[in-house]
Amino acid sequence: MRRLLRALAIFCAAIVGLQVFSAPSAVAADISQDADAIAKSAGQKWALKSLANGKYVSVELNETDAQLEWRLRARADSVGSWERFTLHTNHRAKTIGLRSEATGFLVTSEFNDGGDREGMLRARGVRLGQWQQFTPDYLKETPPSGSPQGSQVLAFTAAPTGGTPKYVTAEVGETGDGLLRARGSRLGSWEKFVLEPVTSAGDVQPPQVGAANATTLNVMSWNVCANNNGKCGWSDARAGFVELNEEIKARLKSPDVILFQEFCEKHAKRVEWMLEDHTGRGWDVRFAPVHHQTDGPRIQKQCAMGPAPDSADRGAFGIAIAVPEENVWYKRHDLTSPQPAVHEQRSALCAALPARAVMVCNAHFTAGGDDFGDPKGEWRTEQAAQLAEIVKVYEQRGYRTIFGGDFNSVPPDHTISDPPNTILIKTYAEYRECDENSIKERPRDGDATKPFDKRAIKIDYIFAQDTAEFSSCSVDADTGKSDHYPIYGTVKLPGT
């Protein structure tokens, strides 16, 4: 019955997705579908508070007037799901979009409406277009006393097509009800807001674990290249979830854990459904974004729009981790990365399996070369050290650890191309890699996972604690529609 319901849900998701992504706006029936897709994300949540009246901005879900549905009002005294947003950019944080947790859609400035609805903000946008993009002005003002650490005072503007940018204003006068409209011509008190980070379950420590028996896990890692790389074989170089699921399913080898890189946020739930339907057991697929940053907070980078003609919004861009559904805790870790206004700010993602005393972490390091800001490998060396420290903290709490991903770095015993080969020396010294010792004369090397026109190199890894044993390690001979080979490892973790 569960598999039948899952198949029906997938069919409905595909139908709803076509309606949502091709329509100019969303309708109430679409809320649960898109909100469910993005609920798998470890992206930072934010609340927006008006400095004019001290109230949090809410998305009004109970409006009966279709022209007012999901409008934004500064009227709440506390933060719930109607007051939580995530921040997104497709312009390296020069502009931001606010996505409502309650509807799953982006805040839109209604410049085509007239009268007192002109410029009204409503959380109904299905993609990050012009009316969903705001230009932030991070003000050098101290947030009010009691604001959470990391809060920022800002104003932001929106621009009608071909028109003059307008400040977003919270209308809090005698007749105002806190309605947010993009209509201000100058910066005053009604145009100032506080952006507050919202604490989530991932901000606390993972559950304590007790003694655990030895366990064996099959681990897979694959950079699926799902965003917009013209060298990958996806439709218009952008993976849709149906196409992505077909490619993943064709490469599954009885996995217990899967690490994905270059993944789109809204695919996480669909991949979870596919894994459950294919394997007949429960899964949890979690996502963590990469970011851009200017002089304000880190903003989630968007995946490029989906293939024509629907230009589907695929959510943020980043990494994902698939683990058994017993997972009860997960956390994103931001890695130190080069030049935030120019280059991607990379993330790691960890998920806990307390009943097995296992913590699994996934990461995608900065790429090398001048174009990515790390030609000498200093940033990747720092990221490798940070990931090792993250893992050690979990080990100190009693977890046995597995970690890996696309580290964009060749192993220490690789000497042919793509220097430096020093980035992972310490990681190899402290942990055991899946393919370690498979090549007698180069024990800290392994089969290539990244093919190029005239060479192939190993840059994808599966590590475990040094006391673990890998009984097998292999690399698929086919990249599929990606530009990486998947890597597989079977690891036995000792009892505790």
Image (cartoon, rainbow, N blue to C red):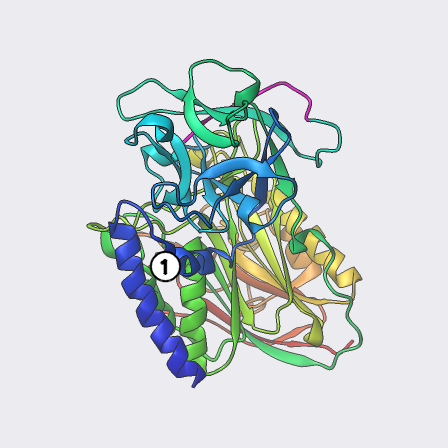
Q: Residue sitting at 37 percent across and 72 percent down?
A: 9
SS for tag 1?
helix
Q: Which residue corresponds to the image point at 66% horizontal and 56% vertical from the top-left?
A: 201
State the quadrant of the N terminus: bottom left
Who is closer to the viewer here, 421 or 77?
77
Inspect the magenta stretch and tell me whether residue 139 lies in it: yes
Q: Is residue 152 magenta?
A: no
Residue 359 in percent (x, y) is at 66, 65
- Is 50 left, or right, of 100 in this rendering? right
Mark 1 is surrounded, within 10 Å at the Cα level, by few (under 14), some (14 to 19) or many (20 or more) other residues, namely: few
Residue 264 visible to the viewer:
no
Q: Is residue 106 left or right of residue 337?
A: left
Counting from the top left corner in percent of width and height, residue 107 is at 42, 39
Seen as rendered, the residue at the extreme bottom is 1
Q: Amino acid at mark 1?
A: Ala
Residue annotated with mark 1: 29
Q: Which residues are magenta?
A: 134-143
Residue 330 sits in which quadrant? bottom right
Q: Image point 40% across, 21% down: which residue?
A: 166
Give the dominant element type of the magenta stretch: helix, strand or loop: loop
The residue nearer to you, when weighing 139 against 107, is: 107
Give the quadrant of the C terminus: bottom right
Q: Is residue 25 above or below residue 219?
A: above
Q: Is residue 363 visible?
A: yes
In the rendered structure, the answer to whether residue 153 lies left or right of residue 231 reads right
Specify the farthest residue to the front. Answer: 175
Work out whether 407 lies above or below 357.
above
Work out which residue is located at the far left of the displayed protein and give it: 309
Q: Is residue 225 left or right of residue 368?
A: left
The image position of residue 419, as x and y in percent, is: 50, 44
Q: Position of residue 235 (x, y in %)?
A: 24, 56
